[in-house]
């Protein structure tokens, strides 16, 4: 098979081992965690910023799209080569370049796995706070692109709250640095602009992140309920009492039974819902808050509040929560996970609405989510071999997202927009808002070669794009 000219130039920009181009090699890069199937023309594994810049310049000469890719764990289709082109995998740029514990900073390449950074500094008493459920696999570059969150978002914020500076390759191959390592630079906040831009403005090749000290004490509680309504009412009551847990998660009975079958985490099989609550800080403060939360849960009819007595028990509870999406595979051949956000005071109303959607379309919907900050993850279960179930799953998802917006929320909290929800952006932004976004994108990406078709509406409503790419199994 003759090597195409584009591939020849990509090999010259990197090396022969760094470029995949044969169809059988490209199959693993046709999709991300959302199960789209759009093949790229080539996949490149650069090892340095200079190689990334050279690859981008080659693609520009061929007027070829460039799609940055981390670990491929994204849930909104951000790493899908929607219009073909070159996938730039940053997996080989996986070095922790510098750890500065005195100033609580680290400088890393984008291919560093999220959890590996915390493991690298744990013995010194530090960690990296953002903790997506996929933190054992997802990379920091992908976290920056999607502005990822996780269970501990409630207390510590999302990725943008922990990123201080970036090195970025622009679509013309120019390399810029944004932010600062130790203090704020004057001028525009380009770091904040690029975090969460989903690879449409530049390719991040270095990241300066904030490290945090490990807390003196950690306590994990499991509040067990016979009513979903009582569990959701407790969430708002906890924060109304002036307590902000490090994490406040909720799982309904359907999810509990699936998780327990998969991980044997110790969740009750007969409960309607549980709250997984974590407290961190000084030992005395944690003990006092645990007593207060136990009282609040009891006042809202929790039948029991368990406290993890050992680190192993706490780890097992969290393993169950973080493996929830995988566990649902025991119940359904396919599922469609949502990522809406609502004010936490509206949780009872929203879960009632989701139950109505479930009845209306005859599909089971499991709920597992970051209750403390109102970030919902309803999992709509269906059989992708049944065309009617596929249509119902899409309609159910659209109605749930629409209700989130109606209640004062958003269409995404941490998974990003990508190609899954770009056509829903007009639900929360005016045409004037979107026009400004397009103008800003054009400044950085004037030829629209960098991750095209993502984030902003294309005019192709769900029938053309979302149905095909959004229904992951």
Image (tube, rainbow, N blue to C red):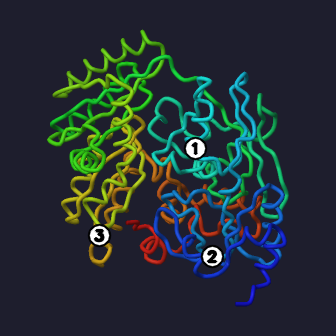
User: Which badge, 1 or 3, is on the more N-terminal residue?
Assistant: 1
Per the rendering, the mark at residue 40 is 2
Who's the residue at 39% across and 27% down the image?
A: 311
Q: Quadrant of the C terminus?
A: bottom left
Q: Residues within 10 Å of mark 1 (few under 14, many from 20)?
A: many
Left or right, 68 with reference to 60: left
Distance (Cα) linking label 3 and label 2: 30 Å
Relative to residue 370, is residue 332 depicted above or below? below
Q: Secondary structure at mark 1?
A: helix
Which of the pair 112/459 is nearer the observer? 112
Which callout, 1 or 3, points to the residue nearer the camera?
Answer: 1
Q: Residue furthest bottom?
A: 1
Residue 78, horizontal then vertical, whole percent: 57, 62
Q: Secondary structure at mark 3?
A: helix
Instruction: Say which residue label 3 marks.
Output: 392
Instruction: Say which residue label 1 marks.
Output: 114
Distance (Cα) linking label 1 and label 3: 35 Å
Left or right, 77 with reference to 343: right
Per the rendering, the mark at residue 132 is none
Residue 431, horizontal then vertical, whole percent: 58, 61
């Amino acid at each position: 098979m003759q090597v195409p000219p584009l591939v020849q130039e990509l090999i010259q920009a990197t090396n022969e081992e760094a470029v995949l181009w044969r169809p059988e090699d490209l199959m693993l890069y046709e999709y991300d965690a959302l199960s789209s199937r759009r093949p790229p023309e080539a996949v490149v594994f650069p090892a340095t910023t200079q190689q990334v810049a050279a690859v981008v310049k080659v693609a520009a000469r061929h007027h070829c799209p460039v799609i940055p890719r981390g670990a491929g764990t994204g849930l909104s289709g951000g790493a899908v080569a929607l219009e073909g082109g070159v996938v730039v995998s940053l997996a080989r740029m996986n070095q922790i370049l510098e750890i500065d514990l005195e100033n609580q900073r680290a400088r890393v390449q984008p291919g560093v796995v999220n959890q590996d950074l915390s493991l690298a500094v744990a013995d010194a008493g530090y960690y990296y706070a953002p903790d997506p459920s996929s933190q054992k696999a997802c990379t920091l570059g992908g976290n920056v692109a999607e502005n990822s969150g996780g269970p501990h978002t409630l207390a510590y914020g999302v990725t943008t709250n922990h990123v201080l500076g970036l090195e970025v390759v622009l679509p013309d191959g120019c390399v810029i640095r944004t932010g600062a390592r130790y203090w704020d630079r004057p001028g525009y906040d380009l770091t904040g602009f690029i975090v969460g831009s989903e690879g449409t403005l530049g390719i991040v090749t270095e990241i300066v992140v904030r490290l945090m000290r490990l807390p003196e004490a950690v306590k994990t509680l499991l509040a067990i309920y016979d009513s979903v309504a009582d569990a959701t009412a407790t969430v708002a009551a906890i924060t109304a009492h002036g307590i902000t847990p490090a994490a406040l998660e909720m799982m309904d009975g359907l999810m509990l039974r699936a998780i327990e079958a998969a991980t044997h985490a110790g969740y009750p099989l007969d409960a309607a819902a549980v709250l997984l609550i974590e407290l961190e800080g000084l030992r005395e403060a944690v003990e006092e808050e645990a007593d207060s939360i136990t009282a609040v849960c009891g006042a809202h009819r929790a039948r029991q509040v368990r406290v993890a007595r050992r680190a192993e028990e706490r780890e097992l509870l969290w393993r169950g929560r973080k493996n929830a999406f995988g566990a649902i595979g025991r119940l359904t051949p396919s599922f469609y996970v949502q990522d809406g956000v609502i004010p936490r005071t509206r949780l009872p109303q929203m879960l009632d609405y989701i139950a109505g959607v479930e009845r209306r379309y005859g599909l089971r919907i499991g709920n597992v989510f970051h209750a403390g900050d109102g970030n919902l993850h309803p999992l709509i279960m269906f059989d992708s071999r049944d065309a009617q179930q596929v249509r119902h799953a899409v309609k159910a998802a659209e109605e749930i997202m629409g209700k989130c917006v109606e209640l004062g929320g958003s269409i995404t909290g941490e998974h990003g927009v990508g190609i899954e929800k770009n056509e829903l952006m007009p639900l929360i932004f005016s045409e004037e808002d979107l026009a400004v976004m397009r103008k800003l994108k054009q400044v950085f990406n004037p030829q629209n070669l960098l991750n095209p078709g993502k984030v902003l509406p294309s005019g192709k409503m769900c029938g053309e794009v979302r149905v095909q790419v959004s229904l992951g199994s």
